[in-house]
Amino acid sequence: MAESPTYTYHPRWLRRRVSTYWWLEKRSYFAFVLREGSCLFVAWFVFYLLLLVRRVLQGDAAYQDFLAWSARPWILLLNIVSLLFLLLHAITFFDAAPRALVVHVGSKRVPERLIGLSHYAAWFVASVVIFWLVLVG
Amino acid sequence: MIKRDAEPFLWMLFSAGGVVSALLMPALLFLFGVAFPLGWLTPPTRDHMATLLANPLVALVLLGLVVLSLFHWAHRFRHTLYDGLQIKHLQEVIAAVCYGGAIIGSAAAVYLLWQAR
């Protein structure tokens, strides 16, 4: 086996400089960053949810305080934007699912459409259950 | 430093968190973030909320949602920072902040939901 040659200098890397703002150059790049950015709103809602649980545990006055706080314009605006990003997250995640999830029944592959549809059906059922638990049950 | 063998496990948490957050969060966020504050619907009473949280199944689902969603965020945010801002040289700091934050949030969720029993 030939020994790898030893260099006395380090060869210069062939690397094209990429702008920090590369994701503004094309629509598809920007869509990518929006999709990935949705995770920030997932994190915000986790925080919001934990705050709600804490307020409920602290008693009725604290819970009413939380409800009043959630109606402040800035919080409301943030939550409306978050809802849009969460819808983007849900749709892009469910649309990617058929490609990530390859299911076989016997020797036949379950059609991609069916896997995609079953995710949307599960989304619908889960949402109905949440509405029922919070508003009725 | 995140070891290479941890990557598949972290990716699995990312994926699971992506699914549960997509299934459950839009409805919850619509209710508690938009519909109640705007007065479209009447928010539940505090007692109703406390009863819900005391239900072990609800608490378990909520805990799963919080923990998996946090790791979903941590993983996705870490990689977006690497690619988006090209600051891979800060990877130890970024990974520590992301996964550390997810662990702290998960601990807070366990503590809160344990108290709600």
Image: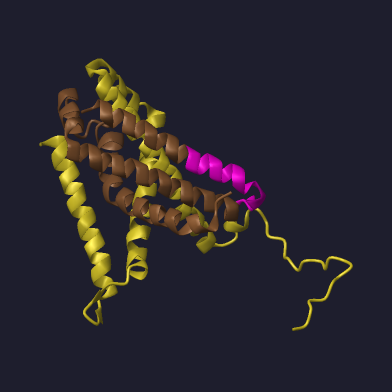
Q: Position of residue B26 (x, y in %)?
A: 29, 46
Instruction: Identify the residue at image location x=17%, y=42%.
Output: A131
The yellow one among the chains is A
Quadrant location of residue A110? Answer: bottom left
- The vertical placement of A71 against A39, above or below, is above
Quadrant location of residue A77? Answer: top left
A102 lies left or right of A17: left
The brown one among the chains is B
Q: Is residue B80 magenta?
A: no
Instruction: Identify the residue at image location x=68%, y=56%.
Output: A19
Q: Position of residue A33 (x, y in %)?
A: 51, 54
Q: Is residue B96 magenta?
A: yes
Q: Position of residue B22 (x, y in %)?
A: 32, 51
Q: Quadrant of the N terminus of chain A?
A: bottom right
| Residue stretch in magenta | B85-100
Give the prevailing secondary structure in the magenta stretch: helix
- The vertical placement of A120 against B44, above or below, is below
Instruction: Identify the residue at image location x=57%, y=44%.
Output: B94
Nearest the viewer among A72 and A14 is A14
